[in-house]
Image (cartoon, helix red, strand yellow):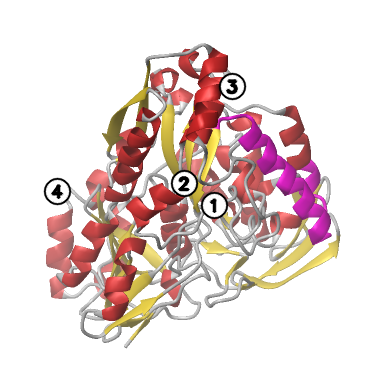
Amino acid sequence: MDVIARSLSRRAVLKTGAALGGGIIASGFPLSQAIWAAEGKVLNARAKRDIVKLDPGFYQGGPDVDVMSCIYSKLTHYKPGSEWGWELEAAEKIEQADPTHIRFHLKKGIMFTDGYGEMHAKDVKFSFERVIKHSSPAKLDWGPLDHVEVEDDYTGVIVLKTPYAPLWMLALPYGVGHIVSEEAVMKATGDGADFGMKPPAFSGPYVIADWKARQYLLLTRNPDWQGPKPGFDEIRILPIDDLKTAESAYQAGDIDFTAISLDSLATFKSNPPAETKVEENPSLFYTWIGMNIDHPKLKDINVRKAIQWAINVPQILDAAYAGHAGVATGTIAPGLVGHRDKTLVPPEGDPAKAKDFLEKAGVSDLTLTIDCRNVSTFSTIAQTVQAQLSQIGITVEINAQDQGSFGTLGVEAEGERWKDLQLIINEYSSLPDPSYACSAFLQDGVGVWNWERFRSDRFDELYAKALTIEDQDERAKLYHEMQDLMEDSGAYRFLTNGGSPIIYRTTKLEAATRPDGEPLFIDFKPV
């Protein structure tokens, strides 16, 4: 407690006392982590959703990883800027000894909080291997990881079963690359499994001071951090699902950094708020309409193909994105290895062909549901699809739900709701390696990420082969075929990769983002 007492101002003590009732203690964070910054620089930023997981070995999406990158350390991390790349973080040196061996040497003096000592190579070994040992849903990020050999306290070797091209731009600098304390996690869990929302120790430049679900997350400086000093004393992150709501929050002064909707981009560019910078960035997201092929109404591929051909993608994008979003050709975004030049079904579709497929299926008076998140963009997509399918005699009922409810719809472990899923408007984030944009649709992902319940032995075979190939042209051919297989199943109608425009207040901060506009909070600088 001595460190805490020395770190707290009178203001901080009062704030900490107020937090005990419903914040830190209620959230399960140890009191020793209740470190509030004195008066200083504060970053107020928007997240697209609330955090749902703080265990990096079991992360569930970008907003979780954005926070993890502040509170844990990785061997490497993404470089901010307009070009994809990585740079050293916890590693003093890292090199590929041969196609299946990567040697690293840790920097000295990286400390875990709460008395768990210095980060060593054994913690790297534990952090990486537990993802595989406990069959985390995120284990695909590690591909053919076999084990990590410890040579001394600071040196180790990552050993792969086969070559793994995505290691450098996916596994190491993203979610599963974060390093946790073996001693702390074993003490907290007993077996090293998922610790969920209760981190037993931190190792990054920030710690979690307070979290109120669906309201805010507060990060403050880690007094044990001996690395480069981050720019802000506090980072306050507000989860705001809807981009329109986020834009209003920015204009009201509640946040100083946020993504904005594509249909608002022209307005912000022509008439930006005072002292605001507008930046346009390409997006790695992919948005699509999926169909649950195990549902009795959608088992017939002719019904699914009828829906594909009935959907006019440009019409949807005009309505939902004011024409500012380009048509997607698959899950892999433009500029990445494996991006397809065109889809099998033309973007405009063809209602006459759609009716022919329905006739082949012998189906009439069909009523379907379409589920989506309750945000303006997806509600507009749902309404447009509803109108388009009505033209071929299909009635669509819209189920718009908040993120908490929608996020578990297709997850078997969360109950029986997946059996009722029919049409789904979904959007996943991606990373700069094409494997990430395809991994959710493997057979292992059915009932986890793969809500369409698409199954293809050929797809899985191609996925595994593509991981081992370094030649980019040869890799691309495999990913082209994989996306062809998805579309030919009738279970997918690809919509857009969107865009990632952001705005931030130039009197408060200098933003640091990945090339796709996603924030790298530890690299933000105050003005």
Q: Are marks 2 and 1 in contact (CB under 8 Å)?
A: yes
Q: Can you give x and y, in whole percent of width and height, for residue 6 in the image?
A: 27, 74
Q: For this rendering, which residue is in front, 62 or 213?
A: 62
- Residue 483 among those drawn in magenta: yes
Q: For this rendering, which residue is in front, 138 or 27?
A: 138
Main SS class of the magenta portion in the image: helix
Q: Name the residue tied to disc 2.
A: 313
Q: Are marks 2 and 4 in contact (CB under 8 Å)?
A: no
384 to the left or right of 84: left
Secondary structure of the residue carrying tag 2 is helix
Q: Name the residue tied to disc 1.
A: 328
First reached walking from the N terminus: tag 2 or tag 3: 3
Q: Name the residue tied to disc 4.
A: 21
- Residue 356 among those drawn in magenta: no
First reached walking from the N terminus: tag 3 or tag 4: 4
First reached walking from the N terminus: tag 3 or tag 1: 3
Q: Which mark is residue 208?
A: none
Q: Name the residue tied to disc 3.
A: 301
Q: CA distance from mark 2 to mark 3?
A: 20 Å
Q: Can you give x and y, in whole percent of width and height, for residue 193 in the image?
A: 53, 37
Magenta range is: 464-491
Q: For this rendering, which residue is in front, 247 or 397?
A: 397
Q: Amino acid at mark 1?
A: Ala
Q: Can you give x and y, in whole percent of width and height, for residue 149 in the image?
A: 77, 53
Seen at 65% across and 39% down, the residue is 132
Q: Amino acid at mark 2?
A: Val
Q: Nearer the viewer, mark 3 or mark 4?
A: 3
Q: Amino acid at mark 3?
A: Ile
Q: CA distance from mark 1 to mark 4?
A: 48 Å
Q: Residue furthest front?
A: 352
201 to the left or right of 75: left
